[in-house]
Image: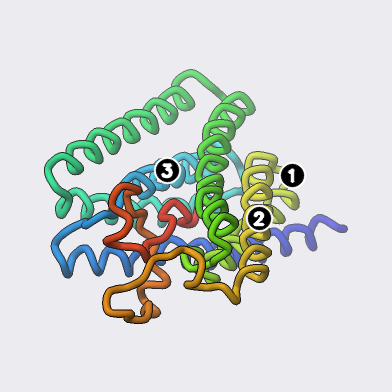
Amino acid sequence: MDPKTMHVLKVFFGVIGNGTALFLFLAPTITFRRIIRKRSTEQFSGIPYVMTMLNCLLSAWYGLPFVSPNNILVSTINGTGAAIELIYVLIFIIFAPKRERAKILGLFTAVLALFSAVALVSLLSLHDKSRKLFCGLAATVFSVIMYSSPFSIMSTVVRTKSVEFMPFFLSLFSFLCGTSWFIFGLLGHDPFVAIPNGFGSGLGALQLLLYFIYRDNKGKGSGTKKPNGAATTADESMETGVAKPDQQPKQSITINGAQDGHV
């Protein structure tokens, strides 16, 4: 394949990756619309949003030209994602109970400190390939951690033989996002983009496989019901907040929140 064709394909898959990642970043707006309306975070956890913000910050930093040339599409979508996740975190802090607010503020501070440390070390102490290696490893580690989050919901699907808590479109767009950035990384010969997103693509494919195996059991296997037998609404099926395990009965329709987009 000639370099020009490879560049065109790389840009194409980068644009596709931007679109699918943006969908995943915006999916939790349903959850936060609910939080604002009720002026309470209820049983949702704010941890996934703080950690996703860290992942976005590190990936956006890695994609900057003085760290990793020819990866500006990585920076644009992750910079956008970091801004969106910051809004989610601030909303969560505003409406969270005092104890939960303190925990999320502490984690938020730690995340900013960690990102600042990575940025400063890479700027002041490292150059060229060593800078790219250091920032790439940091971004890869947290990308893999973020992509590993669906393991919990996948185990629930297998255990209950129900896809009630694993929405099809979130699984589909996770697969498309991971696959697009995996191909982008391969075309750019960049293992720090290809490896974590290849991992994410594989997990997305497994989620889709589980969905098609257990799709006929949706709502039957978990043993949780909505009050008065009410049906789950379309909005509820797309929520991405994480309910705390010890309070699950009150909000059985919440979904794995760490499955936001990450590149």
In what element is the residue under mark 3? Answer: helix
Along the viewing direction, whichever of 30 and 250 lies nearer the viewer: 250
Residue toward you, 77 or 165? 165
Please tell me how many numbered marks the rendered image carries: 3
Q: CA distance from mark 2 to mark 3?
A: 21 Å
Q: In x, y percent, where is residue 16?
A: 60, 67
Q: Which residue is mark 2?
A: 201
Residue type highlighted by circle 1: His
Mark number, residue 210: none
Residue shown at 54%/43% (left/top)? 143
Pinpoint residue 137: horizontal percent, then vertical percent: 58, 31
Q: Is residue 36 above or below residue 90?
A: below
User: Tag on residue 189?
Assistant: 1
Nearest to the observer: residue 144 or residue 76: 144
Q: Quadrant of residue 91?
A: bottom left
Look at label 3 and name its amino acid: Leu
Give the residue drawn at x 56%, y 55%: 159
Instruction: Please state if 59 lies on the left or on the right of 100 as rendered.
Output: right
Q: CA distance from mark 2 to mark 1?
A: 17 Å
> Dot 1: within a 10 Å radius of its alpha carbon, few (fewer than 14), some, or many (20 or more) residues?
few
Q: What residue appears at the point 55 percent right and 48 percent down from the top-left corner?
A: 151
Q: Amino acid at mark 2?
A: Ser
Location of residue 51 (image quadrant): top left
* First in sequence: mark 3 vs mark 1: 3
- Residue placed furthest toward the right: 1
Q: Which residue is mark 3?
A: 57
Q: Please identify, in this view, whether the residue under mark 2 or under mark 3 is nearer the observer.
A: 2
Q: Note whether 168 is above or below 107 in the view shown.
A: below
Q: Secondary structure at mark 1?
A: loop
Please indicate whether residue 227 sits to the left or right of residue 258 in the image: left
